[in-house]
Image (cartoon, rainbow, N blue to C red):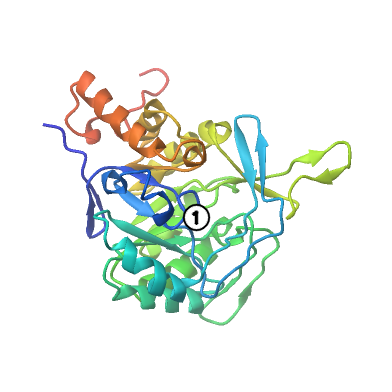
């Protein structure tokens, strides 16, 4: 018998294949073409306290084996999501992970508290790493943490701990901390999130990049820089999952360039407990289902009853 179930905090997911925030809309947009009930979990696009119009166009640029995006967290805002989107999402029997971003600890805590008693919200993902917006945080003493680069919260262990603690204090729901890869070593940040009460980590968000039109000598993106995603970043993401998984005890959701079932297996062998499909959804809305089917075939062919048998099993040099 094959068991694909996965425990994330207090929630048990039916399987470890999710869709990444920002690549599957609010989920409703895909419901007519994808059997979303087969997903291990649906992560909504990141919501902010108030509606955001996002960055100026152009917002997407194709790159070799990937793309740059600078959407800028365009969304309807938390209140509108709860009023207009969530009631329809409740029709689908799929674990719902609501991704949110607060501009400071107080706002984040308020958003988490608002979601705490909402029926149909199973997990909360705290986006600490969007590369297309600037955010800030302050400690309990009121000292301001300076912000000079996008995604700075998840680049700083102290800022990460402050934000996660603010969220943890307001909810007993499962919390996922989504971290930035734009650090020399993700371990201190990951450990800070774990120490502050995160139940799981999401690794990795996009890498900051640029694309310049040689003819005009201008950026191809309206926001100048954007987040690089797609197969081009997969080796970077797998590496970060591998060395972070060796340091933390909580589950890791691996993402970054997963297109084929074999890509997902890479992340599991590196130490991930689950995977999230992102850019591939733009190419094929059913990408996550195909990856799930392929994982099941892999397990059957190799007589694997649980992914725990291969999780973190990569052979080290000399072994």
Within-10-Å neighbours for mark 1: few <14, some 14–19, many 20+ = many
Q: Which residue is mark 1?
A: 189
Q: Position of residue 226 (x, y in %)?
A: 67, 49
Extreme residue in the right direction: 216
In the rendered image of this protein, does residue 193 appear above or below residue 232? Answer: below
Question: Along the horizontal axis of the image, is 100 left or right of 35?
Answer: right
Quarter holding the N terminus is: top left
Question: Along the horizontal axis of the image, is 312 left or right of 221?
Answer: left
The residue lying at 43 percent from left, 59 percent from top is: 193
The residue lying at 47 percent from left, 43 percent from top is: 278
Q: Position of residue 216 (x, y in %)?
A: 89, 42
In the rendered image of this protein, does residue 233 appear above or below residue 319? Answer: below
Extreme residue in the front direction: 32
Residue 169 seen in this snapshot: no
Quarter holding the C terminus is: top left
Front-lying residue, 312 or 77? 77
Residue 244 seen in this snapshot: yes
Q: Position of residue 285 (x, y in %)?
A: 43, 40
The residue lying at 52 percent from left, 60 percent from top is: 128
Tell me where residue 33 sits by quadrant: top left
Question: Along the horizontal axis of the image, is 170 left or right of 154?
Answer: left
């Amino acid at each position: 018998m094959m068991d694909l179930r996965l425990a994330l905090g207090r929630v048990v997911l039916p399987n470890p294949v999710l869709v990444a925030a920002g690549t599957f809309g609010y989920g409703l947009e895909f419901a007519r073409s994808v059997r979303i009930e087969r997903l291990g979990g649906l992560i909504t696009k990141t919501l902010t306290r108030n509606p955001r119009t996002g960055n100026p166009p152009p917002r997407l640029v194709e790159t070799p084996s990937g793309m740059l995006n600078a959407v800028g967290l365009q969304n309807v805002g938390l209140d509108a999501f709860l009023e207009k989107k969530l009631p329809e999402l409740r029709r689908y029997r799929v674990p719902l992970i609501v991704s949110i971003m607060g501009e400071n600890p107080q706002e984040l805590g308020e958003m988490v508290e608002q979601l705490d008693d909402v029926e149909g919200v199973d997990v909360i993902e705290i986006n600490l790493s969007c590369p297309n917006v600037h955010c800030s945080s302050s400690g309990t003493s009121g000292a301001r943490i300076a912000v000079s680069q996008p995604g700075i919260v998840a680049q700083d262990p102290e800022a990460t701990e402050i934000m996660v603690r603010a969220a943890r204090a307001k909810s007993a729901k499962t919390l996922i901390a989504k971290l930035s890869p734009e650090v020399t070593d993700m371990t201190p940040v990951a450990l800070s999130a774990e120490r502050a009460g995160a139940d799981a980590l999401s690794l990795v968000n996009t890498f900051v990049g640029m694309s310049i039109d040689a003819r005009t000598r201008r950026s191809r993106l309206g926001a100048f820089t954007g987040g690089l995603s797609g197969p081009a970043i997969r080796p970077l993401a797998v590496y970060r999952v591998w060395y972070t998984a060796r340091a933390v005890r909580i589950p890791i959701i691996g993402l970054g360039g997963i297109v084929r079932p074999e890509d997902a297996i890479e992340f599991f062998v590196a130490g991930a407990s689950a995977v999230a499909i992102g850019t591939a959804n733009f190419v094929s809305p059913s990408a996550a289902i195909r990856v799930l089917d392929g994982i099941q075939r892999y397990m059957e062919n190799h007589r694997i009853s649980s992914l725990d048998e291969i999780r973190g099993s990569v052979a080290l040099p000399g072994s």
